[in-house]
Image: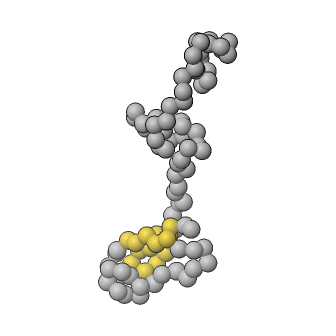
Amino acid sequence: MPIYEYQCNACGHEHEALQKLGAEPLVICPACNEAELKKKISAAGFRLKGSGWYETDFKSGNKKNVAGESKAPEKSGGNSGGCGGSCACH
């Protein structure tokens, strides 16, 4: 379900509402109770997070993975893959 942004023409209050695609637009302002609420046009924003997404997609600072810190078990025996340890498998 998308999140829609609304702004009241009477008091200027901004409001976000989670609604179905086919739902009627809201008209009553939750701040002043006037029927002056209008839907704003805005860009969609979403964040893909969880263990199924690339670890590098939403990195910031020292944060390695938004799903949590889960390290792969270390392989014993050194570079058994022959790649020199410069790939993601080591």
Relative to 4, is 47 above or below? above
Residue extending farthest front: 76
x then y, percent, for residue 47 = 52, 51
x then y, percent, for residue 2 = 55, 67
Q: Quadrant of residue 44?
A: bottom right
Q: Is residue 84 visible?
A: yes
Q: Quadrant of the C terminus?
A: top right
Residue extending farthest right: 82
x then y, percent, for residue 69 = 45, 37
x then y, percent, for residue 22 = 61, 78
Relative to 69, is 83 above or below? above
Q: Nearer the viewer, residue 38 or 88?
A: 88
Number of numbered labels in the structure image: 0
Q: Residue at horizontal 42%, vertical 36%? A: 63
Q: Nearer the viewer, residue 11 or 61?
A: 61
Q: Residue at horizontal 58%, vertical 12%? A: 78
Q: Nearer the viewer, residue 77 or 20?
A: 77
Q: Quadrant of residue 29?
A: bottom left
Relative to 28, is 83 above or below? above
Q: Nearer the viewer, residue 31 or 63?
A: 63
Q: Quadrant of the N terminus?
A: bottom right
Q: Is residue 40 visible?
A: no
Q: Quadrant of residue 86?
A: top right
